[in-house]
């Protein structure tokens, strides 16, 4: 089943994000290589593709996991969680309708 992982950043998270970004991306790339990733990306803190020093306000990942518990465990192990980038993370089941 698909699950949405939504992380909300702490204020002024950019430096913390950049410090562990490569580790964070490796985990997401592993989901992609396994054919389980639907989409992933950050929320710019301002209305811009490149927010610069404004940074990001959070991230969204939609991916396939065996269960809600497995998705939550995966999310809890993220480097952004351990390094204090995210102030909270929610994981919810997701039913994709479109595109097919």
Image (tube, grey):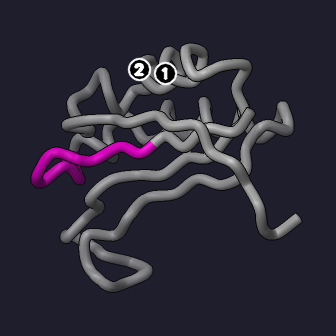
Q: Residue at x 73, y 19 (%)?
A: 66
Give percent across and percent down for residue 89. Answer: 34, 35
Determine the secondary structure under disc 1. helix
Residue 43 as seen in the image, left or right of residue 12: right
Task: Name the residue furthest left.
Answer: 11
Determine the secondary structure under disc 2. helix
Q: Which residue is mark 2?
A: 76
Per the rendered image, the range of residues in magenta is: 6-15
Q: Which image quarter is the N terminus in?
A: top right
Residue 90 magenta: no
Give percent across and percent down for residue 75. Answer: 47, 26
Give percent across and percent down for residue 74. Answer: 54, 21
Q: Residues within 10 Å of mark 2 (few under 14, many from 20)?
A: some
| Pointers 2 and 1 in contact (C-beta within 8 Å) | yes
Residue 97 as seen in the image, left or right of residue 22: right
Q: Residue at x 26, y 38 (%)?
A: 86
In three-dimensional space, the C-alpha distance between marks 2 and 1, rounded to whole angstroms, equals 6 Å
Give percent across and percent down for residue 43. Answer: 38, 64
């Amino acid at each position: 089943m698909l699950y949405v992982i939504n992380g909300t950043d702490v204020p002024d998270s950019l430096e913390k994000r950049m410090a562990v970004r490569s580790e964070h991306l490796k985990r997401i790339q592993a989901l992609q290589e396994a054919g389980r990733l639907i989409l992933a990306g950050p929320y710019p803190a301002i209305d811009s593709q490149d927010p610069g020093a404004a940074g990001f306000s959070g991230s969204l990942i939609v991916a396939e996991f065996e269960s809600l518990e497995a998705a939550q465990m995966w999310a809890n192990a993220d480097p952004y969680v351990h390094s204090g980038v995210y102030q909270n993370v929610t994981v919810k089941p997701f039913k994709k309708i479109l595109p097919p």
